[in-house]
Amino acid sequence: MNGIRELPLRAEIDGVPVVLDPDSPDIAHAAGFWPLKRIVVNPAWFELDAEVQGAVLRHELHHCKAFHMEIRLLMLPICWTKFAQRVGQAQELAADAYAAKMGYRNELIRFIARHQTCAEPFHVAPMTRIASLIKGTSS
């Protein structure tokens, strides 16, 4: 199987399915719209320790539970505006805050420090995310 481990048949967190996509460019991301939401992971997922996996799952779970993908879909006509970018950035910080609130602050900081870049306007620079988590001001 080329070293790729399959996720258990019914992997999920808080009712949201977790699926493996070997072609996904992201280690993990939230995808889909209600009621077909899911968290997609790629093979690099299996290189993370269990605590970091827990942190990342909580971050992505918040995107699903807070309807972030639906909000972004509604903002498509204005996605190029600074307002839409600020909304997307606020969503990222809110997902970070949720993971921290669930007890995964340090693990999420470790993940961000090792794996995150800031390639999209909807994302927050890694050092800004880390500083926000350290201060406990992500919201």
Image (cartoon, helix red, strand yellow):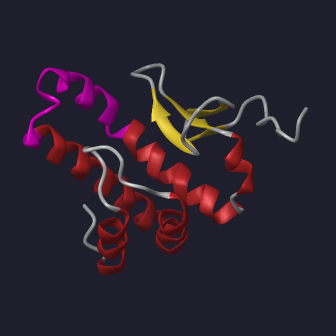
Q: Is residue 80 magenta?
A: yes
Count of labels shown?
0
- x, y (%) of residue 60? 47, 45
> Residue furthest toward the front?
119
Image: magenta residue range: 65-83
Residue drawn 64% across the image and 29% down it:
23
SS assignment for the magenta stretch, majority: helix
Q: Tell which residue pokes out farthest to the bottom in this image.
A: 135
Q: Quadrant of residue 25?
A: top right
Indicate the quadrant containing the N terminus: top left, top right, bottom left or bottom right: top right
Instruction: State the quadrant of the C terminus.
Output: bottom left
Q: In terms of image quadrants, where is residue 65?
A: top left
How far across and down, in percent of the image, does residue 103 sit?
Answer: 50, 69
Q: Return the residue nearer the eye: 111 or 66.
A: 111
Residue drawn where x is 40% and y is 21% of the image: 34
84 with respect to 50 (left or right): left
Residue appearing at x 67%, y 48% in the figure: 45
Residue at 33 percent of width and 30 percent of height: 69
* Residue 66 painted magenta: yes
Residue 108 place in picture, x, y as percent: 50, 65
Tell me if 75 is positioned left or right of 128 in this view: left
Q: Is residue 124 above or below residue 74?
A: below
Examine the rendered structure and indicate whether residue 85 appears above or below residue 132. Answer: above
On the question of residue 67 being in view, the answer is no
**Relative to the observer, which residue lies in front, 15 or 86?**
86
Percent position of residue 63, x then y = 38, 41
One can see residue 11 in this view: yes
